[in-house]
Amino acid sequence: MSNRRQQGSASLEALLVIALLLIPAAALLAQAPQWVATAHATQIAANEAARAFVLADTPTDAVQAAETVAVAVLANHGQDPTDLLDVTTSGVFSRGETITVTVTTRGQPVIVPGLGETGPDHTISRSATERIDDYRGFAP
């Protein structure tokens, strides 16, 4: 009779392991594609913003173009445009110079089953570098 009780406890332990460990782990793992998608969208936004920056006619237009393109790329990738936190540029707006644009977005929160959203918001920053053409003409 004690042998039957031990067999029953093994199935109960297996059920607890599945319920308490495997289901939350699977739920966390299911969020990985969203994290990758956010990082990818941020990188594409940085690439396109850098390209828009070097094609603009004036430094003021360049900054505006980079920000506008970054918002549009995030929206096109299904991200919330309000998750765009910052677009920063470095470099001199002149022929032959290299411009680096860094786009920073808010990452998706970690959702733990039974606990909801946990942890602080995290940010994702990606940079892209473009060179302004040596023979580029600028608007007067």
Image (spheres, grey):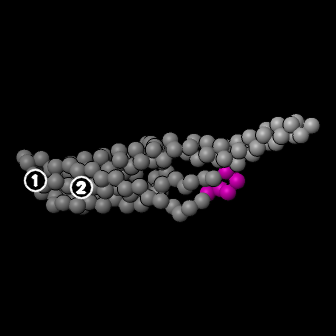
Callout 1 crowding tier (Cα within 10 Å): few <14, some 14–19, many ≥20 = some
138 to 37, vertically: above or below:
below
The residue at 61%/53% (across/down) is: 111
In whole angstroms, how far apart are the C-alphas of marks 2 and 1? 14 Å
Classify mark 1: helix, strand or loop.
Answer: loop
Specify whether 66 is left or right of 124. left
Depth check, mark 2 against mark 1: the one in front is 2
Q: Which residues are magenta?
A: 113-117
Classify mark 2: helix, strand or loop.
Answer: strand
The residue at 30%/46% (across/down) is: 48
Residue that extends furthest to the front in the rendered view of this protein? 2
Q: Cβ–Cβ below 8 Å for labels 2 and 1?
A: no
Callout 2 crowding tier (Cα within 10 Å): few <14, some 14–19, many ≥20 = many
Specify whether 109 is left or right of 113. left
115 within the magenta span? yes
23 to 96, vertically: above or below:
above
Q: Position of residue 60 (x, y in %)?
A: 24, 61
Mark 2 residue type: Thr
Residue that extends furthest to the right in the rendered view of this protein? 1
Specify whether 54 is left or right of 116. left
Q: Quadrant of the C terminus?
A: bottom left
Q: Position of residue 12 (x, y in %)?
A: 80, 42
Q: Position of residue 108 (x, y in %)?
A: 52, 53
Question: Relative to the observer, which residue lies in front, 1 or 36?
Answer: 1
Label of residue 95 in the image: 1
For residue 67, say whether it is visible.
no
Mark 1 residue type: Arg
Q: Quadrant of the N terminus?
A: top right
13 to 67, vertically: above or below:
above
Q: Which residue is mark 2?
A: 100
Question: Relative to the observer, which residue lies in front, 93 or 99?
Answer: 99
